[in-house]
Image (spheres, rainbow, N blue to C red):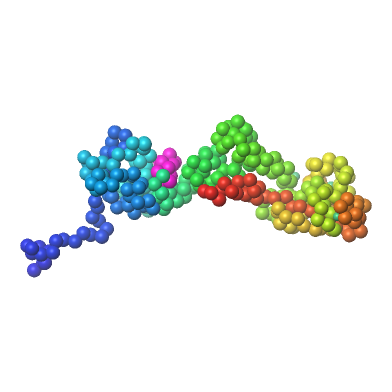
Amino acid sequence: MDNASTPGGDPPKFNNLFCWEPIWFKVEDELFCVPRSGFTAASDLVFTDAFQLPSGTAELEAGRDKSHPIDLPDLKKVDFESLLKVMYPIPSMFIAKEGIKLDLKKEEWMSVLKLTTIWKMDKLRNHAIECLSKTDLAMSAMEKLQLAKEYRVGGWFKEGIKALVQKSPLEVDDLGALVGWDCAAHIFAIREHDAKRPHHCAEGNGVQWLRFQTIRCASCKTTEPLYKTTSQNCRYCGIGSAITDLTFTYGGGTPGSELVLGWSSIICVRDQCRQYALHNANVVCTSCKVNASSTGQIRVYIEPTVDMLIEKYFGDEIKQY
Ligand SMILES: [Zn+2]
Ligand SMILES: [Zn+2]
Ligand SMILES: [Zn+2]
């Protein structure tokens, strides 16, 4: 005879997976009811802290039935409903041909991001970030940067800045209003730098960019430029440039660092030339008085990548996210 059905025997056990206690919420003018366990499991916050519940009997009653819903007065229905769609998906929403797939719109994922950030639901938050990062929900660079600042998403902050650095044209007023003038000024500084990068020096192809202005003495550590001239000609094509505009390429070295080279190893950026550009010039270092032609060497600075400049200007901010 079955023990559970014996009068006076052990009461039935609760199933581990499916014995849901309800929790009731009130948002705007609507009641919502879902399994309580979803909320207690998803957040790092203690349940009562997340919903700022009073302690004592009021806490015990809170959300237990429809006459005692947990009131969430600052929330919008649309945001809350989007979060619930992810926490408690309904089969008709996610059983697709290609398997199980949650089909939320971009705005709905943004709602999920917003609430999971407030309630420290880390797993769900990361999932929302992942979904919003997919190309089919593509965000504009401005949108990405705005959301990155609002919801502290370091990856988006970097990506947003990088996209803005490479985007043309960029409205300074729009950008300043969105991210603040200090941040906007740094973005424009990175843009201005990158605009001078020779097209031969695309990221990752090993061809580095260096500028005439940063050629220095190889015999000492001075930061003074080696050349005191105001313009310089390429020794091969003979075309001259103001030294402030004159740039070269070099097939090695690490961006953002210095390197000692032979005179004749840096290359003219003109497509029609692409030959070794400098003579072994008779120039004396103002600091150590060594004549550079006697060593045959110069010290150059390999220009930094966009990522390095983003790190330089925004690294501290990204670290805080
Ligand atoms: Zn040339
Ligand atoms: Zn070209
Ligand atoms: Zn020197």
Is any atom of residue 30 visible in this view? yes
- Residue stretch in magenta: 106-117
Foreground residue, 183 or 94?
183
Q: Is residue 301 above or below residue 145?
A: below
Q: Position of residue 25 (x, y in %)?
A: 28, 41
**For residue 294, above or below residue 80:** below
* Residue 283 locus on image (x, y percent): 91, 51
Depth order, front residue of 275/62: 62
Q: Residue at x 29, y 44 (%)?
A: 54
Question: In the picture provided, is 41 more to the left or to the right than 317?
Answer: left
Q: Position of residue 127 (x, y in %)?
A: 43, 50
Q: Which quadrant of the figure contains the N terminus? A: bottom left
Name the side, left or right, on which 111 lies relative to 186.
Answer: left
109 is within the stretch colored magenta: yes
Residue sticking out furthest to the bottom: 1
- Residue drawn at 41 percent across, 53 percent down: 123
Q: Main secondary structure of the magenta part?
A: helix
**Residue nearer the viewer, 13 or 248:** 13
Q: In the rendered image, is residue 139 in sight?
A: no
